[in-house]
């Protein structure tokens, strides 16, 4: 398991070293694993929400890797319509927690930026794909947390508009910055087993209700 996490962290580090979302430089690194991707798959399958944390800060390098992983997510027309607010101020975190108190030493508010949802060449605004873009970033962030030995939980904000207003207000967000989730992060102080959610009945083949041939 340790080896797996190390490998995944190395992959994320190399991503961080080679990507630059602001100018979209080509990423030269070829992610090479000699385990047929098992390390990455194991990281996905063993992630689970963690809500109790040790009284231990999260290192800046680990935060950087989570942010880089988040921004490696796919986005419609590659618009990258997001903004990340890293929160370590206890008072701000208390205000954000609302009716779900938390002892997390770190929160990251993952927001959509509706100023970044215009099609290139003045072809107008995209429909609300930004929500999916931001959600993909949140999942990457959760996986990068887990890969680095951290625990995290996605707490939903958008589209519960009362929560959106509260979080936006606490974080001084301008109108175009819409909080989608607040991810709570820290070193785990609990070890719940990952849930097995795989269900054959959720799958169809070729058309809805179609059976596997
Ligand atoms: C959109 C969304 C909103 C969520 N909101 C909350 C929340 O407000 N509080 C919380 O404790 N967990 C929240 N979760 C975490 C889910 O409860 C959790 O992912 C689910 O129970 C499955 O468990 P797992 O993450 O361990 O696989 C949210 C997850 C998603 C995707």
Image (cartoon, rainbow, N blue to C red):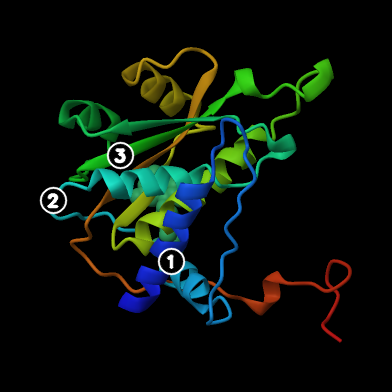
Task: Measure how far apart labels 1 and 3 are at the Cα level.
Answer: 22 Å
Q: How crowded is mark 2: few (under 14 residues within 10 Å), some or many (20 or more)?
A: few
Residue beneath disc 2: 56
Which corner quadrant of the image does residue 119 belong to?
A: top right
> Split into 4 quadrants, where in the image is the N terminus?
bottom left
Task: Judge from the rendering whether residue 178 lies leftward or rightward of residue 52; answer left or right.
Answer: right
Task: Judge from the rendering whether residue 190 lies leftward or rightward of residue 55; answer left or right.
Answer: right
The residue closer to the viewer here, 38 or 130, is 38
Question: Is disc 1 placed on a helix, strand or loop?
Answer: helix
Q: Which residue lies furthest to the front in this view?
A: 28
> In the figure, 70 relative to 192: above or below?
above
Residue beneath disc 1: 8
Of marks 1 and 3, which one's residue comes earlier in the chain? 1
Q: Can residue 69 be seen in this view?
A: no
> Split into 4 quadrants, where in the image is the C terminus?
bottom right
> In the figure, 103 relative to 39: above or below?
above
Q: Can residue 170 be seen in this view?
A: yes
Of marks 2 and 1, which one's residue comes earlier in the chain? 1
Residue 107's disc number: 3
- Whether the residues at callouts 2 and 3 have beta carbons within 8 Å, the answer is no
Task: Measure how far apart labels 2 and 3 are at the Cα level.
Answer: 13 Å
Residue 110 image point, x, y percent = 45, 35
Q: Write the residue at 66% across / 40% down.
A: 75
Residue 115 image point, x, y percent = 61, 17
Q: Write the residue at 83% across / 71% down.
A: 209
Residue 175 image point, x, y percent = 51, 13
Question: Is disc 3 placed on a helix, strand or loop?
Answer: strand
- Closer mark to the observer between disc 2 and disc 1: 1
- Whether the residues at callouts 2 and 1 have beta carbons within 8 Å, the answer is no
Q: Write the residue at 36% across / 37% down.
A: 108
């Amino acid at each position: 398991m340790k080896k797996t996490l190390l490998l995944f962290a190395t992959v994320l580090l190399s991503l961080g070293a080679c990507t630059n979302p602001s100018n979209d430089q080509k990423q030269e690194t070829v992610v090479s694993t000699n385990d047929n991707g098992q390390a990455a798959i194991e990281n996905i399958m063993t992630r689970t929400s963690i809500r109790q944390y040790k009284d231990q800060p999260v290192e800046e390098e680990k935060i950087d890797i989570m942010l880089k992983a988040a921004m490696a997510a796919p986005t419609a027309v590659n618009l990258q319509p997001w903004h990340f607010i890293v929160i370590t101020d206890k008072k701000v975190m208390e205000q954000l927690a609302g009716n779900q108190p938390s002892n997390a030493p770190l929160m990251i508010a993952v927001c959509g930026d509706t100023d970044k949802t215009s099609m290139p060449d003045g072809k107008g605004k995209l429909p609300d794909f930004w929500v999916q873009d931001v959600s993909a970033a949140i999942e990457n962030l959760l996986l990068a947390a887990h890969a680095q030995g951290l625990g995290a939980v996605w707490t939903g904000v958008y589209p519960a508009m009362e929560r959106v207003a509260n979080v936006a207000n606490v974080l001084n967000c301008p109108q175009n910055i819409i909080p989608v989730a607040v991810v709570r992060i820290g070193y785990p102080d609990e070890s719940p087993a990952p849930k097995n959610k795989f269900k054959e009945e959720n799958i169809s083949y070729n058309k809805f209700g179609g059976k596997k041939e």
